[in-house]
Amino acid sequence: MEVLRFLCPPEFATPEMLRAVHLSTLDGTILPVTAKFSESILHVSFSTIDSFRLHVPWDVPSYGHQLLMTGMLARRSEPYYLSVELARGLCASVRNQATDWEVLGLNIPETFWEMIYKAGRLLLQAISLARETTFPRPEVDMIAQQSLSECLAATQILSHCYVERVLYLRKLAWQSQEKKALPTASQTEPPENEDLDEEQMVALLQQMENTPFLEDLPEEEHFSTNDTALHIADALPPKYVGTRLDWTPLEKVVKPLFFETFNQINIDLSWAKIDQNPETLSEFEKQMAWANSNGFPVTTGPVINFFPQHVPQRLQAFRGDFAAITQAVRQYTEFIVKRFRSRVNTWIATARSNTYFPLGLTALQQLELTALIIRWIREFQPTAEIITSIDQPWGEGVLNAPIGASGGNVEVLPPMTCAEILLRSHLPLSGLQLEFNIGYLHRSSYDRPAVCWSRLMDQWSSLNVPLYLTFRVPSASTPDPQATIPTHPIWKEWSSRQQAVWASQILPLLLAKPYVYGIEWAVFRDYRPHDYPHAGLISVDGKIKRTQKILAEIQKFFSLEETGVPKMV
């Protein structure tokens, strides 16, 4: 075992933060470590590897708890200065992302470069001071914190610039497509009541094909193969902003808010709740009928959510028996799909299959069961779109002991590996849903800087399938009487405003990616039972949170209703 030491502020670590510390290799593979903190020194023990990055939670004033990473580190006997290494890693990440986008044609404002140069000067100053000491000095941490703050501020400018450019290009592409689809009467329409013979039809089609629809645009507005939105055609369909509903009808007073915010609905099924109360099936059907009548595309599922609260108790009688569990799941899949297939556009096969193991199955068995469910859905509803959900896409699940596993026989697989196994099985999958629960104590992900979110989406895009993202983000740290998961935010400063700031800075950037087809804010009403605390858009006492306006604005812009970019909070 190797041991690295890092000089830290005395108040740096809590037990929750230490559990999140890990290493990653150059290709992004996550490696668990043993992290201990004593006398202002963080001791990180790990298996021998040549080069790596350290990932560690860090509190940045005004930006909250972020999981930051260092640059590439090498083994050495002298301690590193943690705040300096984190500032160095973030500065490099932001500059690299800016350079990549600039090469692709993005015009980055001078304000960004001023901030990043200032961050670099502060970093050099902190490095100089750190070399003069072998023990923690408050002034070094203070200067490194200033560098981190400048980098994060610059990141917001950079991501806003990227989103604005992509929205602009999407609007141009959409207008061009509309012109091609709806040519003017003088160009294409035959005289009223006049039939066209074959020769006239051929001439008309040739005329439409040769029409220079972009001829009247200024030269700088023509598309370039070297543009930021190189794959802009893939992003042309309006993207969705959705939410989840159970069987409970929406109250009349919140319906206008709902229509303003969302253009897609996920009817959230729970096998355990349906088993306990079969009468809810008719209520689910009414909810789907309401969604259909109001023009909402309906997604339904998951058929089985491996989170223990959603698995029916009767399946525990078959614990570890894959054949018996498979038979029970097939019967339920056939029943539920045939019941709702006239109402449903898209099915979610499974959820959290890579992080929870309540039935004594291995990770590969749960993936095999997911594959079977996907094939069964296609058998019972051949026209359905089918996706499946991957939990904790950052990969932190490999750092924790698997929940529900017995006898230590379950090896948690990285989320990307799970997705690749499914995609290589030649399944009729229409895409992947990635589930993010941000900022909570248990089974969730730390927030990251925007450039890290961008890089993560680029990594998942390598699978070459549409991505659908679902989020839960806290808006308070107080107890939530309707939450079914007993957890709370790690950072105590989460508030309604902080939730809105997060949504305004991260969600537009993710939707600007051409392979991200939609986002889902998983909780709408906090006064209805839900899983993670304070993650909704309407509070327990009925107050509308700021995030609702942000999502409504994002939905409007990414539905191509008008040009522009969502306002930052």
Image (cartoon, rainbow, N blue to C red):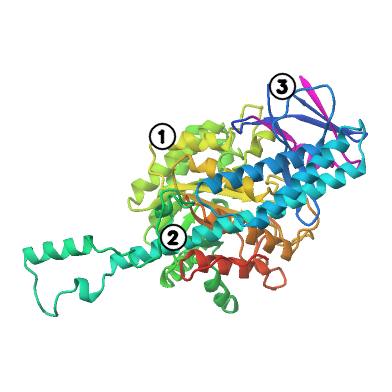
- Dot 2 and dot 1 residues touching (CB under 8 Å): no
The residue pinned by badge 3 equals: 47
The quadrant of the image that shows the N terminus is top right
- Dot 3 and dot 2 residues touching (CB under 8 Å): no
State the residue at coordinates (65%, 42%): 93
Q: Nearer the viewer, mark 2 or mark 1?
A: 2
Q: Nearer the viewer, residue 341 or 545?
A: 545
Q: Nearer the viewer, residue 492 or 103?
A: 103
Q: Which residues are magenta?
A: 1-25
* Magenta region includes residue 149: no
Tag shown at residue 220: 2
Locate residue 245, reporting x and y percent. Answer: 55, 63
Q: Element under label 2? A: helix
The quadrant of the image that shows the C terminus is bottom right
The residue pinned by badge 1 equals: 425
The kind of residue on which mark 1 rests is Ser
Tag shown at residue 357: none
Rate crowding at label 2 as few (under 14), some (14 to 19) or many (20 or more) other CA atoms within 10 Å: few
Residue 448 in view in this figure: yes
Q: Is residue 103 left or right of residue 546?
A: left
The kind of residue on which mark 3 rests is Ser
- Which sits earlier in the primary sequence, circle 3 or circle 2? 3
As displayed, is residue 221 above or below residue 225? below
- Which sits earlier in the primary sequence, circle 3 or circle 1? 3
